[in-house]
Image (tube, grey):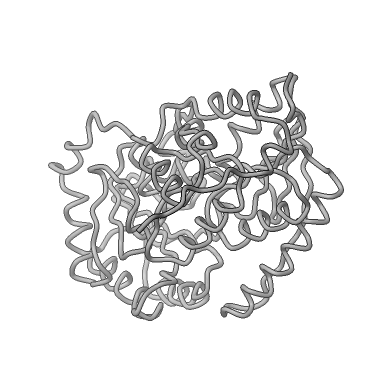
Amino acid sequence: MIRYTSITCLSTSRADAGIYRPLLSALAEDPRFDPTLITSHACTLADLHGVTVINTPINQLGDYPAAVAHATGAAVGKFAEALMQIRPDLVLVLGDRTEMLAAALAATICTIPIAHLHGGDTTRGAYDDACRHAISKLAHVHFPALIEHGRVLQALGESPDRIHVVGALAIDELARFRAESIDACSAAVGLDLRRPTLLVVLHPETISDLPVSSQIEALVRAISAAEMQVLWIDPNADVGHGEINSAINAFTESRRGFVRLKSVSQDRFWNCLTHCRALVGNSSAGIIEAASLKRATVNIGARQEGRVRVRNVIDVGFNADDIARGIQRAMSEEFRASLEGLVNPYGDGRTAERILSVLAELPDRMNLLRKPRPAMVTA
């Protein structure tokens, strides 16, 4: 008998909304489950039949640490109110954002068991890394993407029988993804992608001695020197995003062959990645998803440092010359040819299936809430 029928997924940003889709679809199609999505942003998954969507807006007023802290504190209360309204058997949280930490804390206070997706990963260049590990300690069951991540969770004191390596949900959706034509994608974004184009996504590196202004300056100098078209997607709401947006505005005024997109759906992003020559910046998509599309990633700085990557990733520092050389290498026919046959270690398209199998076998609620005592460290 399944003990966890009412399942709630918590979505806090554009980054995780599309990732949940294959899991929510699988839950909705399985008569054993009653899925709900609580979202704090404009939801793009309203087309999912059988999934109740509850919107819980959370506003961040300001681009400075105290604003993020206030928004995070407010989010705890907002998520708690929504969870007490639904009273699900289990909540699923994903990743490492401050808002997701707020959601996990709300579930903890409401004594609702938590399942954490993508725990055990490492991103040393952002305080998201600490948020991720904090969520893992609040969680009662873990769905890491890779075996390496499972080992990290064990090192954090999590019980091996609560850790289930399942792969990355984004790869489930990518396994079914079929790109639209280059002409259709060009029309959608307003840029002729038949011409060499860079897809650029840069988020602030929140743990760094280098000011955000210097981070963006190095990137702008490098892509200016590349003399290619640029399709630039706005950063997320980390502290420092305002400086990046200001730099994008200035870049727009001085350059032709440039399009800025403030936000895009997951499918639109993947279509752009398919038809652009390389992804430049520090998005996790360059590490996790670009390998499935066999696209080069010029990964800048330390934000994604520690993540498992394969040969499509070219790591460079926040130095204009290094970034330019990375772009040049990514554009070479030799490098592009080397990506043929590339296998993405993050998944095989069956992650949602594995998660549902685990959900069907979880212990009863009280036993799940009472986490096993971690192994003691001896001298």
Location of residue 62 in the rendering, given as x and y in whole percent from the top left corner: 63, 78
Give left or right: position of 13 versus 53: left
Q: Is residue 101 above or below residue 213?
A: above
Give the residue displayed 49% in from the left and 50% down from the top: 189
> Which quadrant does the C terminus fall into?
bottom left
Residue toward you, 355 or 41: 355
Where is residue 273 shown, x and y percent of the image?
39, 45
**Image location (x, y in percent) of residue 231:** 41, 57
Position of 296 with respect to 59 (left or right) is left
Q: Which residue is drawn at 44% across and 71% down?
A: 206
Check the image and name the residue furthest to the right.
85
Residue 243 shows in this picture: yes
Q: In this view, does 215 lie above or below 275?
A: below
Seen from the viewer's position, the closer of residues 213 and 16 is 16
Q: Quadrant of residue 288?
A: top left
- The residue closer to the viewer here, 151 or 172, is 151
> Quarter holding the N terminus?
top right
Percent coordinates x, y for residue 217 in the rendering: 33, 77
* 80 left or right, relative to 147: right
Residue 180 seen in render: no
Q: In this view, does 218 lie above or below 226?
A: below
Image point (45%, 40%), residue name:
271
